[in-house]
Image: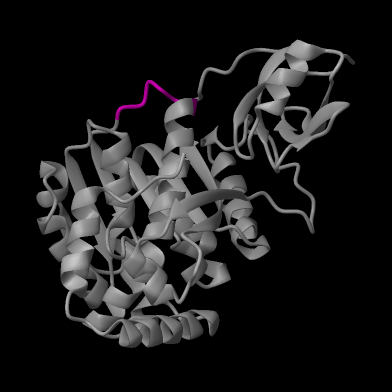
Amino acid sequence: MTPDLPPDLSSALDRLAHGKSRRELVQRAETISQRYRSAVGSRDAIRDADDALAYAFTRLPATYAATAAVLTAVRDAWPQFFPSSLVDAGAGPGTAAWAAVEHFGNVAHIRLIDDNPHVCALALRLLAASATPALHNATYDQADVLATARNPASADLVIASYLIGELAPDRLASAAEALWSAAAGMLVVIEPGTPAGFSRIRALRAHLVAQGAHVAAPCPHDRACPIVDPDWCHFSQRLNRSRAHRQVKGADLSYEDEKFSYVALAREPLARTPPPRIGARVLAHPRVGKAEASAKLCTRAGIVTATAARRDPERYKAQKAWRWGDAVDWRELPD
């Protein structure tokens, strides 16, 4: 399933871009990308209102798609979770907040935090266009994200999307603690699906699990991550490109694939199906041949290759339908 932007968000972006030079937005987007590649944060990469708009056209659809995919996994893992309040930390143009209200209809109180005045101003204009009261009435603090977020149990759900990669490595532990302190129910952290992005996710996960957090997704366990370098855990979400999106990105294809790594951490342990039947996560595109179907899985037993022979039609059919990122049942091998 390809998650499209909510119609009111898409329409608001189009209205803001009306009359703007697409060529200039393209140039600005390229400049912003160059600034990010030089390891500056969003405050230095996005320097005025037109920069913010160019950034939104190039990156908001992809980050929305990734966040939507993550929140779908969270909802599937913990269907009893009904957050009524949200903190969007490092909110940028408010992408995660829009995705959250699409996935959790109970969200009524939203607080966004970012220190960039230009994305803050853009986000407020987008939020004002929403027909959803929680978004329309959301508050946006232009402030230091971690200092402001460090407020014990300030929201049921805290989302930090593409934030921690902008921090110095020696700040990761304190950042993890600040974000975790604000989460009454769950903390969701999303990063680019690169080895460096996954490394940050793995370090944050280990730090907070040691402090009592419980992994809701993607891992089917709270044990140490079994991924060994140079491999890394990441997922992919396809999204449709609008005509304006293609123009600003200078792209021909009508879609793109956003790669991301993430972890969702809960205050309370989730009920898991006991052995020998346990949950697992598909870590790569399954391979389907005429004789068998196989898939790389993360399980409580570690990384496992699940293989189903065609002569076992029921199991073969089930594994043939698996997709990268799916949560699936897996029977542990006997001792």
Give whichever of 156, 92 is nearer the camera: 92
Look at the picture and state if 98 lies above or below 265.
below
Tell me the residue at 79%/56% (across/down).
229
The answer to whether 315 appears left or right of 212 in the picture is right
The answer to whether 30 appears left or right of 205 in the picture is left
Tell me, yes or no, if residue 100 can be seen here.
yes
Tell me, yes or no, if residue 306 can be seen here.
no
Q: Which residues are magenta?
A: 77-82
Look at the picture and state if 272 lies above or below 229.
above
Q: Quadrant of the C terminus?
A: top right
Q: Which quarter of the picture shows residue 243?
A: bottom left
Q: Is residue 80 magenta?
A: yes
- Residue 252 position, x and y percent, is 49, 69
Tell me the residue at 14%/43% (across/down).
132
Q: Which quarter of the picture shows residue 187?
A: top left
Tell me the residue at 52%/57% (across/down).
258
Q: Is residue 34 magenta?
A: no
The answer to whether 197 appears left or right of 90 in the picture is right
- Residue 64 position, x and y percent, is 38, 53
Give whichever of 103, 8 is nearer the camera: 8
Give whichever of 39, 305 is nearer the camera: 305
